[in-house]
Image (spheres, grey):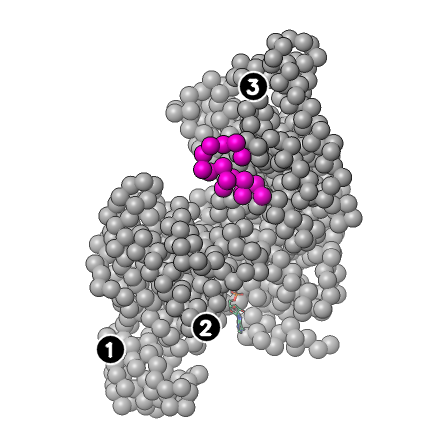
Amino acid sequence: MDVSWILNDLNEPQRAAVTAPLGPLRVLAGAGSGKTRVLTRRIAWLMAMENASPWSILSVTFTNKAAAEMRGRVEAMLEHPLGGLWIGTFHGIAHRLLRQHWQEARLPRSFQVLDSSDQTRLVKRVLRDLNLDDKKWPPQSATHFINRCKDDLQRPADVIADQKPAQRQYLNIYTLYQQECDRSGLVDFGELLLRAYELWRDHPDLLTHYRERFQHLLVDEFQDTNTIQYQWVRLLSGGQGDVFVVGDDDQCVYGFRGSKVENIQRFADDFPGAQTLRLEQNYRSTGAILHAANALIAHNTARLGKNLWTDAGLGEPIQIYAAYTETDEARFVVERIRQWVEAGGKRREAAILYRSNAQSRIFEETLISAAMPYRIYGGLRFFERAEIKDALAYLRLVANRHDDPSFERAVSTPPRGIGERTLDLLRNTARTANSSLWQAAGSLLTAGVLGGRAAHAVRTFINLIEALDHESRRLLLPDRVAQIIALSGLRDMHEESKLDKGEMRIENLEELVSASAGFVTQSDPVIIGVDPNEPDWLNAFLTQAALESGERQAGPGEDCVQLMTLHMAKGLEFPLVFLVGWEEGLFPHGRSSTEERQLEEERRLAYVGVTRAQTRLYLSYAESRRLYGQENHPAPSRFVGEIPEEFIHDVRARAKPRIRVATAPTSPPKPVSGTVPAGLRPRQRVRHAKFGEGVVLKVEGEGYHTRAWIDFPKTGGPKWLIPAYTKLDIV
Ligand code: ATP
Ligand code: MG
């Protein structure tokens, strides 16, 4: 059979990975070396050569966007749709399993997914119920404790509370929080994974079913799996079978959320007979970008170590801009994008990558005033706005009456005369009866214990929700959303509002309707896990809103500038990249600069950023910055100083970074390939594998930092090359 279409544009090690015999295999390789490409081809290979049906394949990617792209590529290669193939994120796949097996998972059919801010709200309520002062017991710490336990597969009963009273208190909070979630049919992100794990662990018949079904398991970005994700893969595969994982330890950037780079190492022990393959050629970036990235990451000590080289020429140097202020930085970036577009480039080829979400605002503002469309990926912006959360509370209550956080939100927005006293009564009744607020409201009305006005207000609210559900049930999702918004009174509330924000809020509510319309037309029911014959769009939409927020600033097909955090950029690539805000305190992030382990994670993030760029890379920092309402005069990031001078061009003369890392190696980073030819001189003749024969015109720097300006008359003229990184033979 002719398989050249799967293999012909792969290099030897990539081919070896794609065609490897079935069995556990890990591919360990640096950025841009083709890991994701190899994983995609492997899926095609399995179907074409191993007779695998789409049914038997489960592939895990980092985002839903990546999943959709991967599915599209394989479909294009095989020229038929892949209905049964499961592909998505760990959370997405777990969610899908739970929807299918809600009974075995002991969940109500219409369980709701809590996003992180809903989760915090619920934790706050638990703190109130326990009479704990949230200054002493910060909700964020409690949430962190809960999530960490879940990531480590620990139910409250499994947590071994040590003698520390604080630990015991957090355990109490966790216990009560979980009871609330279970009672209300709410599932947080960590719970999705834990439930799905327990589902298989506790139902051997189901596990057997899925083991027999999913003969082939593939995982991209394996370095960022946490304990439960790793154990989930182990459980499903039974520690053997065809498990194909790809990853790069230098790109592990979710340590703060529990991802464990050790999982890459453990793989070899836990999956007997596992093969390891390495890819070393980078196809994404120019030489200057790649070498700068290699030099930067060489400052980390905890590494598995790899070689990564390119046969691309050095390309342009990395341009560093020392901005006066954050506004100047934004202006500079937008101006350069404008020039790029004028020169024939596309806006979507440009990415602005930042460390913290809050940095986006100034770029948004500048882009808007330059009338340049943009799009923010993954930020919680749109769905975090208050008016959107209000509308979602109604939608969720329609989907599930026992969703207490949504009940609390909807019952008081718009205000309907239900005071704190009545609400407290509802809460207490619910707690005593171990019921939801909805049920408590019902029983209080029946018992007739509420005063006339309060009873009337509560009854009106209950009737309203019932009516919303009843009257909208047969409508298409966007009509349903529009109707619920209208009847909830939210729209009127903003229309009457004297504040100028009212109009904007109504626009946002309208945007929610378009978001739901877009969701229905653009979603692949298979990916989002709804039954294609009987899709429950409302639930699926609400889940989507919780899982993936933002993303709606520019229309889907529109050519627009891409904005996202460095974390979101993992796995992506862009011809033109701006890495902004490289300042001590901002990046590395304030709390990370003193602790070595955290600092190394920040540096990996910097490495991820640099390696997103294909041809042109800008780094910038501001000498004065107003952020979170304060004016600062930060020092340039130490990471700027870790990029060798020979790859840099200064747009404006700048102060040198003042901070050096104590553990930075004193010797220069090791070259990735080639050697330093002693005494490279002008007029010498050399040969390069790709550019052929050339003549040295000029030599600058010394040792590993030597660079040479070499004329290759047959392949496009003179180029800068770094002999330490490029193999040059003297002829
Ligand atoms: P990351 O670590 O950032 O996730 P990766 O290892 O997954 O990177 P890919 O995204 O698969 O790398 O590939 C990087 C780029 O190189 C892509 O544009 C890909 O199409 C291209 N590429 C990979 N292998 C080859 C090859 N053999 N020939 C030409 N281009 C290639
Ligand atoms: Mg990748």
Q: Quadrant of residue 653?
A: bottom left
Asked whether residue 23 appears in the rendered view, the answer is no
- Residue 329: x %, y % from top left: 32, 56
- Residue 623: x %, y % from top left: 25, 53
**Label number found at residue 344:** 2
Number of the front mark, 2 or 1: 2
Do the residues bearing badges 2 and 1 touch, measured as CB atoms within 8 Å?
no
Residue in the image at 74% along x and 37% along y: 473
Do the residues bearing badges 2 and 3 touch, measured as CB atoms within 8 Å?
no
Q: Callout 1 environment at 10 Å: few (<14), some (14 to 19), or many (20+)?
A: some
Mark closer to the chain start, 2 or 3: 2
Q: Which residue is mark 3?
A: 417
Do the residues bearing badges 3 and 1 touch, measured as CB atoms within 8 Å?
no
| Amino acid found under the numbered disc labelled 1 | Glu
Residue in the image at 66% along x and 65% along y: 74
Q: How far apart, in angstroms, are the residues tagged by discs 2 and 1?
A: 34 Å
Q: Which residue is mark 1?
A: 700
- Residue 555: x %, y % from top left: 56, 56
Query: Is 503 within the magenta?
Result: yes
Q: Is disc 2's CB within 8 Å of ligand 1?
A: no
Total labels: the figure holds 3
Mark closer to the chain start, 2 or 1: 2
**Taking 105 as reference, is 428 above or below it?**
above
Stretch of the chain drawn in magenta: 495-510
Q: Secondary structure at mark 1?
A: strand
Q: Quadrant of residue 465?
A: top right
